[in-house]
Amino acid sequence: MDQSDSEKDESAMSEVLKPAAKPLGQLFALKSVFQHRPKTISFNHDLVGSSICTSTKRAVVLKMSGAKTNIVRETFRANGFKTTTSDTSSWTVHWGKAQKFASYNSLTERQYVNHWPGTFELGRKDRLARNIAHMCRRIGSKEFGFFTPRTFIVPGDYKALKNDMAESKGMYIYKPCASARGIGIKVIDSISQVNKGKYSLVQKYISTPYLIDGRKIDIRIYVAVTSIDPLKVYVYPEGLVRFATKRYKKGHAAKKSRMMHLTNYSVNVKGADFVQPGADLPLFSVDSPPEFDESWFELSKWSLTMLAAFMEQRGDDFKATWESITDVIVRALLCGDSALNSAFKANCPSGNAFEMFGVDIMLDAALKPWLIEINTSPSTASSSPMDRVIKSSVLSDLLDLVGLHAPKTPLPPRSGRIKRSLRDLDDFIPEELPDHAKLTLLELEEELHRCGRWRILFPAADSPYLRLMEIPRYNNILACKWLATRTPLSVLGPVDAKLINVRRRQIQMINRHPPSSFNRPVTNARPVTDPIRARVKPGSPKPLLSSSRGLGSRVSTRLDSGQSRSRSRRPMAHTVIRTPSQRGIVGKAPGVGRTVSAGPRRAGVSAARLDMIGSIYGAGIYM
């Protein structure tokens, strides 16, 4: 029997696609698609251009503080890092608790920390609530007031809370402002249950939650912020769905049952009905979920893929729900944008930081997503085999996305202090951009080539979110306009076209294989392939990037970079903005209006642009 074209392609690429026998603890480096750019440390070494790093005999060091979980320790050790907890200065990555602002100024160009300065503006419940209220006043409650329950911060809002409770006769949820793991959270229905003198937060209780088998759920979604200026936000297309172990009952009588009202793992794991998920469960297939298995009802934790399968079987629109969820995520992060940008400019001029947030979302019966909280240090503990696979994959893909500089490689150039004006971007001609702008875009493209499963939410072509920023800043507008063009990558610098073509074919092949064909042991950090498949309307061209809020495929790719780390905001009339490396005069702010879906990234991509990177990004979902 003759082989089909696809079978011949698979046969020809079989050697390229075989996972390499990577020695445990060996450091790998990854080439950039741009020539003369530094290599980055590779945590997923199977793509062409990844090779053993022989340029140094000195160990790369992970410094850990706070909770020291096995997943973090093993992921770094499996990729050539030595681990320390001592107060040494010779580390490459600091993973742990938030840093003091002063410590950021002492970072070298090869050191990275896993927190941006000032992220407590999002991570503390009270600060997040105040920042959302601020954006409601500045931009409008229609844009920022719809995704969180009505919130009161005691003691300041005690009188307003008392009046509201007297009028509504409903239930509320009481939370300490800086707590975690469900500590101190309780359901209340009387003002007498609120300590007027204790600093706390009270929210209206969502009394009509989305139920699965009669139980409440929430969704833990992983979000990465790799840069502040331009703001770069990514979402991971796999996560955890956590169940309350007691069936939900309406009414005040059951308000004391924490295992009915709270979905926190640390609360429900203590219950006799809690059942840990096993290893052989569907993962990384939210775009094409498998058939739902009713035996899953017995479990107390699902993957996001399992939720997609359940909703599809039930007739609920998961894709539309996911689009709404990612929209809420971006808007929530924009609420802390101004404060984070100020902290970044003042304390982290090197930009050598990154952040992984754990965003908790709850759905109501109408499938409306509600933001519960944003965790700045989401748990990396492996409480079950499923947790272990998901979290190790998230972590290794995150570290590739960040692009840690490989040892003994020349560091990329950095922009100096530069005057810039938004008027310079009115006539966007990529070939005529100044060098500092091209460097920003080059770093963005390198990051997109390393993103693995991570899917970019912002910047995006024709992004609706620029209008929702207090100051959208030069670099944010620059990045969005660049992604909307059909410009070949060679405009930014010399490109290794051969490497791009080989990688493109390799990634296309990986997309056609089931995940079981390429899974590597968990100790080696993550499954090798990205089994996520995108659905495209028949006859439709591939968009350059996935929808800013959709499920566009992002296949496992990574490449070299020297990230642009900075921040974002929105222009006031003729405001001078200064970043650590540049400053500029910003024109008048555009009007603020109701946003609409960004839609597909690019419908008519030029042959040159598509040949360069279109297929590497993969097809997007048309919502």
Image (tube, helix red, strand yellow):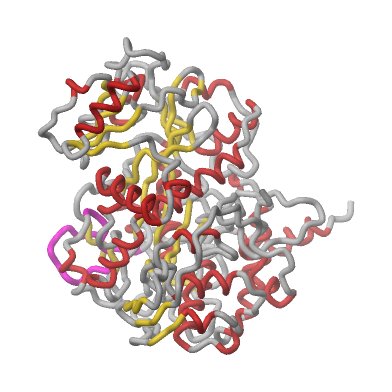
Q: Position of residue 434 (x, y in %)?
A: 49, 89
The percent coordinates of residue 27 (x first, y second) are 38, 67
Image quadrant assignment for residue 107: bottom left
With 188 as the anchor, is 528 left or right in this view?
right
Residue at 55% x, 43% y is 322
Look at the image and say whether residue 395 sits in the magenta stretch: no
Between 620 and 559, the one lying in front of the other is 620
Q: Residue at x 41, y 14 (%)?
A: 250
Q: Residue at x 47, y 75 (%)?
A: 443
Q: Is residue 458 left or right of residue 5?
A: left
What segment is highlighted magenta in the picture? 80-97
Q: Residue furthest top?
A: 253
**As drawn, which residue projects farthest toward the right?**
1
- Which residue is most to the left? 197
Asked if 364 appears above or below 457 in the picture, the reply is above
For the stretch drawn in magenta, what is the main secondary structure?
A: loop
Please say if 389 is above or below 474.
above
| Residue 430 point in image, percent of width and height | 59, 83
Q: Report whether 196 appears left or right of 55.
A: left
